[in-house]
Image (spheres, grey):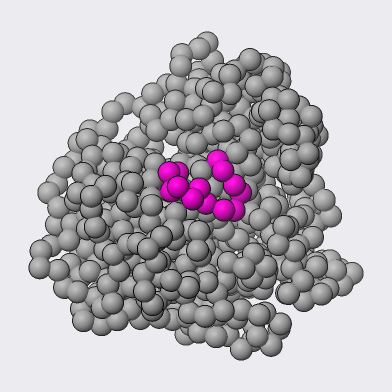
Amino acid sequence: MSERAAVLASFALSPFGRGEEAFDVTRPGEPARVAIVRDESLASRGFSRPLVALVPNRCLSESAPDAMTSDRATHLLYDALDGALERALRVRPSLRSERVGVAMGTSSGGMRSAERLFETIESGAVIPPELAKRATYFAPFADALHAHGLAPRRATQLVTACAASTWALGVGLLWLRAGIVDVAIAGGYDAHGPFVHAGFDALRATSPSMPAPFRVGREGMALGEGAGIVVMVRESDMRGARPAFFVSGFGASTDAVHITAPDRTGAGLARAATSALEDASVSPSKVAIVSAHATATPYNDAMEARAIQSSLPGESPVVMPFKAQIGHALGAAGVLETLALAATLESSVLPAAAGTGDIDDDARVRLLERSEASATPLDLALKQSAAFGGANAALVVESSRTTPRASAPPPPRSVFVRARATVEMADFSLISSVTGTPLDRVSRIDEISALAATSVARLIESSGVPIADLRAGAVIVGHALATIDINHRFYARVLAKGPTAAEPRLFPPTSPNLVSGQIAILFSIGGPSAAVCRGADGGVEALEIAHDLVAAGIVDVALAVAVDSLGRASREVAGHLGVELSNGATAVLLSSARTDIELTTDAFASAPGHGGLKSACQFVSGPV
C-alpha cells in the first residue's frame, strides 16, 4: 500500500471568485451555479461563439509587483501561489527551509505576452526585450517562483494541455513517495485570450449555447481561466497538522489513436483511472463521485461515459462536470476540479450538474439536478482528465476523515540508459520505414513532431530495440521554446483576417503536448505521455521526469525526447534570453532492466534545448 499525500493548504482563483469561493459546490438543495456568460468584447471582435468564464478583476490582488501584472497568466499564478504559501506557512513554518518541489501545469503559459509579440512582429515594430522574454511557455512559472523567493530542489512545468495540472499533482505525489522532496507545491494556471479562443472556435469545440455535458444535443464547451495550488506532504510527515484532504493515487495513459479526437471506446482513459485506483490500493466500489473531464462535446462525453463504466464496473457514482460551471480552464482545470471534488467529500454533499435536457443514452452517467447532502460520509472520489495528443490522467482523492494508513514507500528502482540518438533534421522516410506508417501520412505531421519522431526512429534503428518494448512505456517530451513559431503562423492569420479565418488544422500543433501524442501514435505507445517546459533546459527536465516514472515503478521503460525547431519568433526570443539553441532532437530510452549504464539525477547538469538532454547522458555512454 503506497503512502498518501496530505494536502495542508490550497488557494485558487476561478470565475466563481477567490479562495474557497473559487471551487465551492457545497450548497445542498441548490442547482449548480454557473459563471459562464456571453462576452460582448469577444463578439465585437468577430468571435462567433463568445461564451466564456473569466476570473473577476476584483479577485486579482492589487499588491502584486508590476512585473507580475504585465501578463494575466503570471498574475493569476502569482496570486494563487501567494495565497497557498501564506496558508501553508501557518501550519508548516519550516517550509522554506525544507526540500521543496514545485510541479505546475499550464496549457498556454505566457500566451497573452506571446500574442503581443506576434502583433509586434506582424506590424514591423521594434520588439521590446521584456516582451520577448515573457512570450514563452515558461515565463509565468519562472517569474512567479522568483517573486516568491522559491528555489526548489525539483521543479517541473507540465505543458500537457488540458491534463496538465492533474499530471502536476500526480508528479507531486510521486516525488513525495520517492523522498525526493519533503513538500510538494503543485497546481496549474492559464489565462483566457484571443489566441486560444480562436483555436477552439476553429475546431468547433466551443458551444454557441450553455454547455450541457452528457446530455442530448450538447454542442461543446465554454472556455475559462484560473489558477489553483495545493501544498502537500507525506501523510507520515504531517507533524500534527490537519489535512484538508488526501491525494492517494495517480494514473496516466495515452490513447495513441488521434491527436485531437478521443479513443471512442474510452479504453485509454479507463486505463488511467484503473491505474490510479490500483496505485491508491482502493476498490472501485468505494468511489462515490467522479469529477469528469466533461467537455460537453459529442465524442468526448460518450467516450468518458464508457471509460467510467469500464473502470467502475457495476457502480453508479455521481458525476460532476465542473467545466459547465466555471468554463474550461485548460491547464488549471485539473486542479480546480480536484479542489471542488475535495470540497464535496469534506462536506459530504453530492454535487449538482450544470446543463439541461435529457441524458444521452450514448453518454449515460448519473447526474444530479440539485446538490444533495449525503446520508453517509463521502470518503473517496476519482478525478479524470484528457488532453490533445491523447494524454489521459487520473487522481484518487480521499477525505480527511479516512483512516490513517501511512506506510514506508518501496525503495526506488535503479534506472539505466538503454539507447539514445540525436538528429538534426526530420527524415519522413525513416519514420515510415521504422513504424510501418504510410509515407504520405507521415509527411503531413508538423515539423516539430516530425523532428522528434525522427530521433526516436533513429534510436530504434541504431540500437535494435523492438518497437513492442515501448508499447507500455512512457513518453516525456521536453521543450525550450516549444511551438512558438507554429503559434506565430496560426495567430498571424487571425490578426490578418479575423478569428473566423483561424486555420483548424494548424491549431492542434500549437500545443507542445502534440509532439508526445504523435510519437505515441506512430510508435503505438499506450503508457503515460506528457510534455514539460520549465525553462530553456526542458530537455533535461524531460529526462528527470522520465527517470522518476521508471524509478517509481510506474513504467519499466520511458522515452525522454527533446526537440528544437527554430523560426523567426523563436530566434527573436532566444536572442533576447541569451540562449543558444540549434535545430535538432535527442531521444533517450530509459529502462529498469540492468545494463552497464546507470542514470542518476544527481549528475544532471542544466543546459538548453535538445543539446541539454544529449549532454546530460554524455557522462554515461560517450559521444552520440
Q: From the viewer's side, name the closer residue of 273 and 98.
A: 273
Residue 563 shows in this picture: yes
Residue 494 is situated, as x and y percent measured from the top left of the image, at 77, 71
Outermost residue, front side: 361
Determine the residue positioned at 84% across, 66% down.
121
Whether residue 83 appears in magenta in the rendering, the answer is: no
Whether residue 266 appears in magenta in the rendering, the answer is: yes
Outermost residue, right side: 124
Residue 570 is situated, as x and y percent measured from the top left of the image, at 77, 53
For residue 176, side relative to residue 208 (left or right): left
> Does residue 267 sit above or below 81 in this rendering?
above
Q: Quadrant of residue 489?
A: bottom right
Q: Quadrant of residue 561?
A: top right
Quadrant that contains the C terminus:
top right
Q: From the viewer's side, name the closer residue of 408 and 323.
A: 323
Q: In which quarter of the image is residue 16?
A: bottom left
Outermost residue, left side: 375
Q: In the rendered structure, which segment of residues is drawn in magenta? A: 256-269
Residue 14 shows in this picture: no
